[in-house]
Image (cartoon, rainbow, N blue to C red):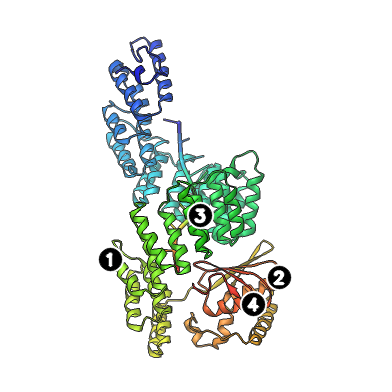
Amino acid sequence: MLLSSVTPCLPSHTLFSLNNNNNNYLNHHNRLLDYLTQCTSFSHLKQIHAQTLRTTHHSHTLFPFSRILLSSTSYDLHYAFRLFHQIHKPNSFIWNTLIRACAHSNAFKQQAILTYLDMLNDGSVVPDKHTFPFVLKACAYLFALSQGKQIHAQLFKLGFHSDVYVNNSLIHFYGTCGCLDSAQDVYDKMPERSVVSWNVMIDALVQLGEFENALKLFVEMQSSFEPDGYSLQSVVNACAGLGALSLGMWVHAYVLRKCDSDLSDDVLMNSSLVDMYCKCGSLDIAKQVFERMQKRDVTSWNSMILGLAMHGQAEAALEYFTQMVDEDLMPNSVTFVGVFSACNHRGMVAEGRKYFDAMIRDYKIEPVLEHYGCLVDLLARAGFIDEALDLVSNMPIKPDVVIWRSLLDACCKKNAGVQLSEEVAKQLIESEGSVCSGVYVLLSRVYGSASKWNEVGLVRKLMTDKGVTKEPGCSSIEIDGVACEFFAGDTSHPQTKEIYQFLDEIEEKIESTGCYIPDFSQATLVDELDRGKKNSLRLHSERLAIAFGLLNTKPGVPIRVFKNLRICNDCHNVTKLISSIYDVEIIVRDRARFHHFKDGSCSCMDYW
DNA sequence: GTAGGGTTAG
């Protein structure tokens, strides 16, 4: 078939009647480039390929086929590989092109590394400075740490360890694989850095939860480079992790001020901002940013749905889900994590089951560990512990620590009995890579609530013998843009005296309401049992942070507290009362979700 | 023709 009969936009004369005249040859090259630029479909490309085969002289094959190979990688990598194998002595550009295409494709990532190895074994070309960024990208996304390390050694031997692009890729690779030290080492030893070097290092810190160090590096960066969209987005993510609302708002303002860029319309940036505002407790601003977005993709919706779920607004989260589907956006795996999380925080068991079935049946999404995790937690915490256990034993994925801990937590909360709790605890200990205090704390609570004090003692001894210490409770609060951290029983703050005096005042007022009965059921510190119980509860870190907040905040301004652990029953009761006595809104982000305390009640409706 | 980006259970 003549090309012109299916692609009228192209001239009807023969495309590539190449001969040995050099000028002609160049003209044909340019014409081929033109056609490839206009090529809009795979079938069109195949026609150009067929035509090239018919008209190309053997001595000039490399150029046209490498260009066609380059174009074909965006359609069909199998086809690209077939073309590749027909090319005699491909040069490094062609190898790199193929490796890059594999690294960018979901299904061929492993092939990127294999192709790189083929390139080494082939022996007729040497990897160049372009090869490494591509193959390291594939290693990063495959978490192929040992292969990446070998590649690092090879590039070192070949003398590419001073190349800024190669080093940036190495930092990204090590960061993605969780090797912060190696990433830092590469970064430190770089002879020169670009803005990307700073960005990838900052992002590695953010990815690994080193938010404060990420922010420090961001500040440092500004003496050498002006931050770009990538830097700002990493900072927004760090703010989300830290709950640093003021800084997050500052970055948002900076983004809006940067008129020379399209950053304020950028889907990725706006989705991060939505996520940041949700995680910093400002759901209203998150919604505003979301509503004003010119373009939204699945991730934007996911950020909003997850944010609403985190704040306990299950109905709204499910409405957003419906709206998203109505707008013909296909939900993905993460969307359903948000949906289940929403159901979970409201105890909506029937809906959770319904959406789980719909996800598999209607949306053809295979459940992953996170989905099972949500569902197990939803069922167990709502009291369907047997059903949750059934699900765990029948699911096709090996349950992890989080799932067993959810179950043990539910056993504990629902008084599921010592025997069952012990069984779950055993599974938890077996699945745990490192020794963690959570299981012992929960077990001691199980024994405590069954008045098995000998066992409580045994658990405590076990903790001492194994050197297990409980993660200390820590709450932070931001006043005038400055974050203050409080540990349980902290006396290090300059305002300590005032804080403790104020705690006495709060306690008197709370007791005078007659509504307060101390709740020791979750006295999480085993050593709290040794101390005056009431005293230890009131020294929980969130109480100190709230007292500090009340002392230093103008009336009417909400108090925002971030806690590393889950809020205990007693602190929850007390905070409700404080919100009513002092007529203040208190927003607490604990390890799992937000609690908005106002007028004596909490947005979680006491289900958490 | 080169590098880097967002959302994932409790």
Disc 2 from disc 3: Cα separation: 32 Å
Disc 1 from disc 4: Cα separation: 45 Å
Disc 2 or disc 3, which is closer to the eye?
A: 3
Q: Amino acid at mark 3?
A: Ser
Residues flagged by tags 1 and 4 on a common chain: yes
Of the numbered discs 1 and 4, the one sitting upstream in the chain is 1
User: Which residue matches tag 2?
Assistant: A552
- Secondary structure beneath dot 4 equals helix
> Which disc number belongs to residue A303?
3
Crowdedness near tag 2: few (<14), some (14–19) or many (≥20) residues, C-alpha within 10 Å: few
Crowdedness near tag 1: few (<14), some (14–19) or many (≥20) residues, C-alpha within 10 Å: few
Tell me: A51 left or right of A176.
left
Residues flagged by tags 2 and 1 on a common chain: yes
**Chain of the residue displaying label 3:** A
Tell me: A502 left or right of A292.
right
User: Which residue matches tag 1?
Assistant: A394
**Chain of the residue displaying label 1:** A
Disc 2 from disc 1: Cα separation: 53 Å
Residues flagged by tags 2 and 3 on a common chain: yes
User: Which residue matches tag 4?
Assistant: A578
Q: Give the quarter of the figure containing the N terminus of chain A.
A: top left
Q: Amino acid at mark 1?
A: Asn
Disc 2 or disc 1, which is closer to the eye?
A: 1
